[in-house]
Amino acid sequence: MSVAERAMKTQGRAIRWNSNKAHIAVIAALVHDLGHGPFSHAFEEAEKTRLKGQEGVYQNHEAWTAEIISAQTGSIRRVLTEEFGGSGAAADDIAALLTSDPTDIYGAVVSSSFDADRLDYLQRDKLMTGSGAGGIDFDWLIDNLRVQSVSDGTEGIDTSDSAPPSFETFCFSEKALQAAEAFVIARYHLYSQVYYHKTTRGVEQLLSAFLQKLASELKCNTPQELNLSEKHPLVEYYASTIPTLQRYLTLDDTVIWSAAEACKARTDTELGQLANRLRNRDLMKPITIDTTHPTATDRARRRYIEEHLGVEIGKSVFLDRAPLNIYKDARREPVKPHKRVRILRSDESTTDLARLSKPIEALTEDQEILRYYFLNESTRQIVQNIRG
């Protein structure tokens, strides 16, 4: 919220100012993550897998956030009504802002290539993880932040005979080119070195496996058989065919830990073994496959896994695959207008950062993280010993 306020104050004179929209954007920056479930993105990914194939059932944290904020009987709506008056229109405006593509500068503050969230977590996560990666020149970026009216096409390329619609969005003055470049590279380094670190992802894989196994076991066993109470929040949550907000709000990290603590007593079951590994930090070790510049060994190991261990994927072998495309080139694929970093040139035109920076252009190439985690260390050792 503090970052959003600073961005709004810096640019307030440069745009068609709407104080109510600005206030809504700042409050949206404050509450935008209320819908995160326990263990944040790890729980969200587990839910995505659990509910796969059920049309319209899975909700991401943005959708949960909007539901929490706009709920007629919710405390957030009550507080916003007391603050803004009316019948809760502010809550609806914030929910809409968080679940739709930005159409103006106020939406861009909340969700864009250079939004308050990114600016905050890049600095916060660098500090809290002690990582040397992720450094940005925050003050210089803010000082050189501009608002410019741009077209919805690819700057510098004639996309049609008629002029595309224009909109206001953030960009940087040309003297902040290297700072903007460092901002995008910082995101790449934090993703590759922190968020996608093999240990972090290994814990998430183990947690996801436990949650999915628990949900599966509850379909054919009573909670008591799993050493859980019928009133345990996770039991009641999984009992609903369609997850409800009421049940969702009962979940937090301690609920997950308590379920693992209860289930670990059943050491004779797969669920109990997963719970024990989770509680004892007995993490799975991975085999990492280089897909960008694969060696003969990478290819041989991947081929062996696919041919001999394919049936074990999701059971005793867990696939971790994540894209590392931090920045996309709008000349090669569709990119949402607000998801691009633009540089304001001396002639008042704007140009996509990837067209001015060779390092950023390189980041637009397809990259991904590909790992396989193994419950059985002996199986991992067999794959580890394969050479091309």
Image (cartoon, rainbow, N blue to C red):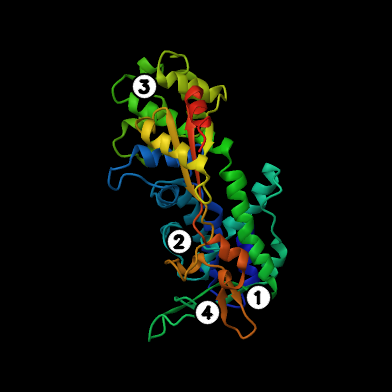
Q: CA distance from mark 3 to mark 1?
A: 59 Å
Q: Which amino acid lies under the numbered mark 2 shown in the image of this protein?
A: Leu
> Quick one: label 3 or label 1, which is nearer the N terminus?
1
Q: Nearer the viewer, mark 2 or mark 4?
A: 4
Q: Nearer the viewer, mark 1 or mark 4?
A: 1
Secondary element type, mark 1: strand
Number of the label disc, if any, that sits on residue 97: 2
Secondary element type, mark 3: loop
- Residue at 47 percent of width and 42 percent of height: 299
Q: Percent x, y for residue 111?
A: 51, 61
Pointer 2 with pointer 3, Cβ within 8 A: no
Mark 1 surroundings: few (<14), some (14-19) or many (≥20) residues within 10 A: many
Q: CA distance from mark 2 to mark 3?
A: 38 Å
- Residue at 58 percent of width and 41 percent of height: 197
On screen, residue 98 versus residue 11, left or right, reads left
Q: Percent x, y for residue 303?
A: 42, 38
Pointer 3 with pointer 1, Cβ within 8 A: no
